[in-house]
Image (cartoon, rainbow, N blue to C red):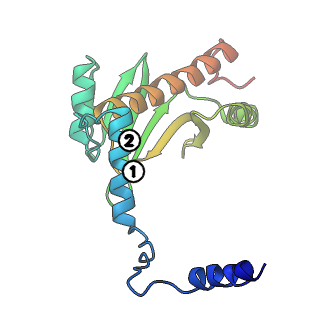
Amino acid sequence: MAPFADRPRRWWSRRARPAPDTVRPAPAVEPTDDELHERVAALLARELGVAEPAEDVPTPVTPARIAAWMTQNQFSYFVDNDGDLGGLWRGRLFYFFLFGEQAEILQVRGQWHREVAIERLEEILDLCNEWNADRIWPKAYVRVRDNGRVHVVSEVATDLEHGVTDAQLSQMLFCGLSTGSMFFDALDERYPDPAGVAP
């Protein structure tokens, strides 16, 4: 047994002492956010293909773009004395306004082509409230004129702070016109009699 007694001790002593020329690996360096972004972009490009640049980029809304849309869709329009753009859609008057500090809020506002007697104001308000509770568009409300006549109004407003493509603008304008017309159709159905006459 004596010849093997010191063998384990030497083996452990050799393992415990590193060789003088042993080089330890440097700790891993964490990649920066930009490097990670480039790696992810390269991975996505490899897996999904390279994205084609957009042909139609969002740009600010202007009255000229709205007028061009009206012309392209063969709708008649006018510019009133205040410089506001308007037109007729299915016999109803609609205006196209731009509000906000940078004219970034597009509003399509329609007006029912009939006036309502002041005596019907409460029932018209109830009808508008029912509509607003059940639907997102358009917002429905009334305006009482100085002569006591009631005008019923539809409104669709959209914040376009970051601009809009031609396709998006077209969709928003059609939304304002078509949903406003749906509301006015519901009024026509509800009031086949002259609404301007007191009940």
Question: Residue 177, percent across and down?
Answer: 45, 26
Residue at 52 percent across and 21 percent down: it is 181
Q: Is residue 185 above or below residue 120?
A: above
Question: Residue 102, percent across and down?
Answer: 31, 58
Residue annotated with mark 1? 40
Question: Residue 189, percent across and down?
Answer: 65, 13
Q: Is residue 151 above or below residue 74?
A: below
Residue at 72 percent across and 78 percent down: it is 4
Estimate the spatial distance between the alpha carbons at disc 1 and disc 2, rounded to whole Å.
6 Å
Dividing the picture into quarters, in which one does residue 49 lie?
A: top left
Mark 1 and mark 2 in contact? Answer it, CB < 8 Å: yes
Residue annotated with mark 2? 44
Q: Secondary structure at mark 1?
A: helix
Q: Amino acid at mark 2?
A: Leu
Which quarter of the rendered picture does the N terminus lie within?
bottom right
Dividing the picture into quarters, in which one does residue 10 lie?
A: bottom right
Please give the count of numbered marks on the rendered protein. 2
Extreme-front residue of the structure: 2
- Seen from the viewer's position, the closer of residues 58 and 182 is 58
Dividing the picture into quarters, in which one does residue 94 lie?
A: top left
Can residue 161 be seen here? The reply is no
- Seen from the viewer's position, the closer of residues 161 and 38 is 38
Q: Secondary structure at mark 2?
A: helix
Q: Amino acid at mark 1?
A: Val
Extreme-right residue of the structure: 1
Q: Residues within 10 Å of mark 2 (few under 14, many from 20)?
A: few
Answer left or right for 115 relative to 68: right
Residue at 73 percent across and 36 percent down: it is 133
